[in-house]
Amino acid sequence: MDYLQAIILAIIEGITEFLPISSTGHMIIASSFFGIAQEDFTKLFTVVIQLGAILSVVVLYFKRFFQTVDFYFKLLVAFIPAVIFGLLFGKKIDALLENPITVAISLVIGGVILLKVDDWFSNSQETQTTEKISYGTAFKIGLFQCLAMIPGVSRSGASIIGGMSQKLSRTTAAEFSFFLAVPTMLGATVKKCYDYYKDGFVLSDDQINLLIIGNVVGFIVAMLAIKSFIGYLSKHGFKIFGYYRIVAGLAILIIHFFVMKLTVI
């Protein structure tokens, strides 16, 4: 991985982390395009730079993020399912991360769901603030978030839909998804770094610089993406993201099988 590739991946991360279009899926496709998807450092990079994007939540929602102890316990309850599923199925998830077809299929299926989700929950929005979310609701949102362990599903999309299914407004569901991303991605980063060192890898000075640049770029771009997304979502809903996912997923499938056909010939 060179510096230009690191910056491009970080921009993709910053834009897509909080949109319901799957940041992991987009980075898998981009790193595959660059021919670096199979590198161990690339797999580490795509996880670790998500932390930079997530930290933008702490900055943008500084006053609301640092609130009552009860709020943190709710985040912990929502985070628990990801810990359990991650420990149980971590190796299988890593295998899926190497398959662009999984990403493409997930993009299409998720896109179809996003086209319908506004209609499904248009009349059931009651909770308008993250502070009013119950422990039971937090746990159920955490279960929905686990669906994002399948590449292409979208962590933010799954958790937002999970929130809306529990009678949260679109904006409240999105904001709780942002808050939940902080412990989730922090935990994922720590685990990925631990596994990386456990497997005998040591970061070079150049790789450390790439991680720093990736986190800084991801942080800055994510700040802009969050503001734009919340404003758009509250007014227009999810349909544009649904159409995008379907088009992107079908394009990946067509390109993949077309390239395979040419290779066979």
Image (cartoon, rainbow, N blue to C red):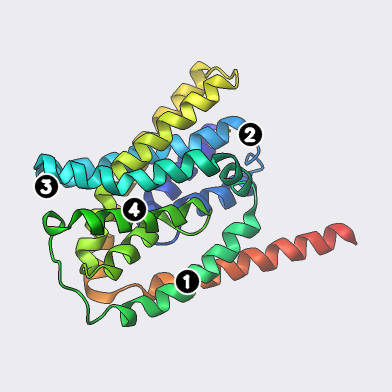
Mark 2 vs mark 3: which is more N-terminal? 2
Q: Let me know if residue 98 appears in the view.
A: yes
Label 3, label 4: how far apart the Cα atoms are: 20 Å
Of mark 3 and mark 4, the one earlier in the sequence is 3
Q: Which image quarter: residue 213?
A: top left
Amino acid of disc 3 = Arg
Residue linked to disc 3: 64
Q: Is residue 3 above or below residue 257?
A: above
Q: Secondary structure at mark 3?
A: helix
Which is closer to the viewer, label 2 or label 3?
3
- Where is residue 228 drawn, in percent x and y? 26, 60
Can you identify the residue that label 2 sits on? 39
Residue closest to the far front? 136
State if disc 4 and disc 1 touch (CB < 8 Å): no
- Which of discs 1 and 2 lies nearer the camera? The answer is 1
Per the image, the residue denoted by label 1 is 111
Residue 36 coordinates in the image, percent (x, y): 63, 39
Q: Which callout, 4 or 2, points at the residue further toward the start of the chain?
A: 2
List the residue tagged with mark 4. 142
Say which of 131 and 238 sits in front.
131
- Please tell me which of labels 1 and 3 falls first in the chain: 3
Q: Is residue 219 visible?
A: no
Tell me which residue sits at (29%, 53%) in the image: 139
Q: Earlier in the sequence, mark 1 or mark 4?
A: 1
Q: Position of residue 110 (x, y in %)?
A: 48, 68
Q: Is mark 4 in CB contact (under 8 Å) with mark 2? A: no
Q: Amino acid at mark 2?
A: Glu
Picture quadrant where residue 137 is located? bottom left
Quarter location, residue 127: bottom left
The residue lying toward the viewer, choosing from 109 and 219, is 109
Look at the picture and state if 199 lies above or below 260.
above
Q: Nearer the viewer, residue 114 or 7?
A: 114
